[in-house]
C-alpha cells in the first residue's frame, strides 16, 4: 500500500457516514457514479491521492509525444511547419507544462479533474488548428487529423479523469474536427466525403470505446474504495475485540509483530474474590448471574481506569489488577491500595443497589513479576512470579470484607494515608508462616494523576 493510500485512510478531515456492512455490500453490488453524502467527498479525495502521480506521469508522456512530433512537422508540412510549431509548442506544450507545474501545488487537489480535461480538449483543438493551417499540397494534409485519435484515447484512459470529465474531454476534443471537413471542402467531392466520414467514424468509435473504458475505470475505482472501507471496518472491529481482551500497549505491540515478554522489578498485584460465589451461582439463573458479574466487574474496571491500573483478567469470580505496568509508577502501591479500599466500598454499594449481599476478599503483594502473552489463537496476557502467587494467597486467607497485604507491600505503603491492623502471622500455603496486615483505611481516595501515558518497558 502506498503512502498516498495510507494518507487517504487518515480521513483528511472528512466526516464519514456510519454505513453498516450490508449497506457497503449493497453499494458494491450495484456500482454507481455517486456515493451517498460525505462518502462521495471522501471517495474523490481518495481518488486524487491514488491517481495524482498517474495523472502527472500521463501528462509527462503526453508532453514528450506532443513535442516529439515536432520532428515530423518539418517533413510533413514543409511550407507550414513554422505555424505548426507555434501551435504545437507555443500553445499545446505550454498548456501541458503549466498543468504539470500546478500538479505540484496544493490547489491541484481541487482542480485536477477540470484542469486536466481542459488541457485534453485544448490539445484536440491544437491538432485541429494544425490541420487547418496546412496546404493541400503538403504530405501531412488530411493525415494530421488522425492525431485527434491519440488525444481521445489519452483523455479517456491516461490521466485518470473521472467518468463525466473523461466523456466531456473526449467528445469535446473530437467536435472541432468537423471544421476540417468544411475547410477542406469534403462535401464537394465524393472521394473526399468518404475519406472524411471514415476519419470521423474512427474518431466517434474511439469516443464510444473510451466512454465504456472510462465508466469501467471509475466504477472499478469506486469498488476498490468501498472494498477498502470494508477492510478497514473489519480491521477496526478486530482491533476493538483485541483491545477488549488485551491491554492497549500489549495489543499495539502484537500488531507490530513483537513478542511480548517483559520483566518488571516492582509492581503491585491485587486479587479480589467474591465471597460465597459458588453458593450464589446455585441460587441465580445463568442470565442473572452473568449480569451480576458484569455489573460488579464493570464498576471495578472504571475504578481501575481512574487509578491508571491495568486489569489483567477475570477468572471466574476473581478480579486481577496490577499497578506499575506498563510504565513504572513510583506510587503504584498506593494506587492499588486505594483501589482495594474503593472496590470494597463499591461492593457494599452494589449490595444495596441490587439487594444481594456482595462481599470481597482482597489480597495485595508488591514485588517483581514477569508479564507476557501466551497462546496463538486465543491470546492471553498474564503475570507470573512469586508476587502473583503471594497476592493470590493473601486473598485466600483474607476474611470476608478484608484486604490482606504482605509485609513488603505494607512497607511500601508506610508513611502514606493508610491504616493497618496487625501484624498477624499466618500459615500460607506453599510459603509457611508469614507476617501479614489488614489494610483498613482510608476510604477517601485522592484524585489520581491525569495525562500520564504508558511507556513500554524494555523487554527482558
Image (cartoon, rainbow, N blue to C red):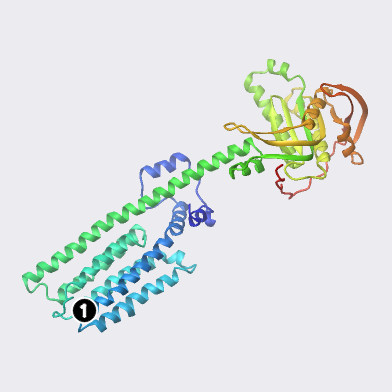
Answer few, some or many: residues within 10 Å of disc 1's Cα (few below 14, many 20 plus, some between 14 and 19): few
Residue at which label 1 appears: 75
Disc 1, SS: helix
Q: Is any atom of residue 308 visible in this view?
A: yes
User: Horizontally, is 37 left or right of 403 in the view?
Assistant: left
The C terminus, quarter of image: top right
Residue 404 drawn above or below residue 412: above
Tell which of 269 and 357 is nearer to you.
269
Residue 65, by quadrant, is bottom left
Q: Estimate the x, y position of residue 358 in percent, counting from the top left.
A: 76, 24
Tell which of 331 and 389 is nearer to you.
389
| Residue at left offset 66%, top offset 40% | 260
| Residue at left offset 47%, top offset 46% | 229
Residue 153 drawn above or below residue 88: above
Q: Estimate the x, y position of residue 55 in percent, counting from the top left.
A: 39, 63
Residue 269 drawn above or below residue 430: below
User: Horizontally, is 80 left or right of 265 in the view?
Assistant: left
Residue 364, by quadrant, is top right
Amino acid at each position: 500500500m502506498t503512502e498516498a493510500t495510507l494518507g487517504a485512510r487518515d480521513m483528511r478531515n472528512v466526516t464519514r457516514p456510519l454505513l453498516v456492512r450490508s449497506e457497503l455490500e449493497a453499494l458494491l453490488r450495484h456500482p454507481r457514479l455517486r456515493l451517498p453524502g460525505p462518502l462521495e467527498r471522501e471517495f474523490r479525495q481518495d481518488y486524487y491521492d491514488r491517481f495524482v502521480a498517474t495523472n502527472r506521469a500521463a501528462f509527462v508522456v503526453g508532453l514528450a509525444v506532443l513535442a516529439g512530433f515536432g520532428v515530423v512537422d518539418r517533413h510533413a508540412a514543409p511550407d507550414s511547419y513554422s505555424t505548426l510549431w507555434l501551435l504545437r509548442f507555443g500553445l499545446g506544450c505550454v498548456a501541458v507544462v503549466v498543468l504539470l507545474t500546478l500538479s505540484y501545488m496544493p490547489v491541484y487537489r481541487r482542480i485536477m479533474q477540470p484542469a486536466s480535461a481542459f488541457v485534453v480538449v485544448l490539445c484536440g483543438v491544437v491538432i485541429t488548428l494544425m490541420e487547418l493551417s496546412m496546404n493541400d499540397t503538403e504530405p501531412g494534409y488530411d493525415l494530421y487529423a488522425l492525431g485527434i485519435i491519440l488525444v481521445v484515447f489519452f483523455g479517456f484512459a491516461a490521466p485518470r479523469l473521472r467518468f463525466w470529465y473523461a466523456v466531456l474531454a473526449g467528445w469535446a476534443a473530437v467536435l472541432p474536427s468537423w471544421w476540417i471537413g468544411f475547410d477542406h471542402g469534403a462535401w464537394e467531392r465524393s472521394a473526399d466525403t468518404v475519406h472524411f466520414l471514415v476519419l470521423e467514424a474512427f474518431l466517434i468509435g474511439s469516443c464510444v470505446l473510451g466512454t465504456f473504458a472510462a465508466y469501467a475505470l471509475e466504477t472499478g475505482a469506486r469498488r476498490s474504495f468501498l472494498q477498502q472501507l470494508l477492510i478497514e471496518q473489519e480491521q477496526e472491529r478486530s482491533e476493538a475485540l483485541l483491545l477488549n481482551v488485551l491491554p492497549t500497549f500489549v495489543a499495539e505491540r502484537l500488531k507490530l509483530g513483537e513478542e511480548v515478554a517483559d520483566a518488571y522489578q516492582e509492581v503491585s498485584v491485587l486479587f479480589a474474590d467474591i465471597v460465597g460465589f459458588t453458593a450464589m451461582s446455585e441460587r441465580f439463573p445463568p442470565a442473572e448471574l452473568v449480569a451480576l458479574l458484569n455489573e460488579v466487574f464493570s464498576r471495578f474496571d472504571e475504578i481501575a481506569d481512574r487509578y491508571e491500573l491495568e486489569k489483567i483478567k477475570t477468572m471466574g469470580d476473581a478480579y486481577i489488577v496490577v499497578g506499575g505496568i506498563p510504565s513504572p509508577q513510583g506510587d503504584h502501591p498506593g494506587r492499588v491500595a486505594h483501589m482495594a479500599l474503593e472496590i470494597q466500598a463499591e461492593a457494599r454499594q452494589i449490595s444495596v443497589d441490587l439487594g444481594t449481599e456482595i462481599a470481597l476478599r482482597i489480597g495485595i503483594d508488591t514485588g517483581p513479576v514477569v508479564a507476557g502473552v501466551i497462546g496463538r489463537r486465543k491470546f492471553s496476557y498474564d503475570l507470573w512470579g512469586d508476587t502473583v502467587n503471594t497476592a493470590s494467597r493473601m486473598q485466600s486467607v483474607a476474611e470476608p470484607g478484608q484486604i490482606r497485604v504482605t509485609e513488603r507491600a505494607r512497607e511500601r505503603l508506610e508513611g502514606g494515608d493508610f491504616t493497618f491492623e496487625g501484624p498477624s502471622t499466618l500459615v500460607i500455603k506453599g510459603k509457611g508462616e508469614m507476617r501479614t496486615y489488614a489494610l483498613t483505611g482510608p476510604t477517601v481516595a485522592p484524585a489520581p494523576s491525569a495525562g500520564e501515558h504508558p511507556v513500554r518497558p524494555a523487554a527482558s
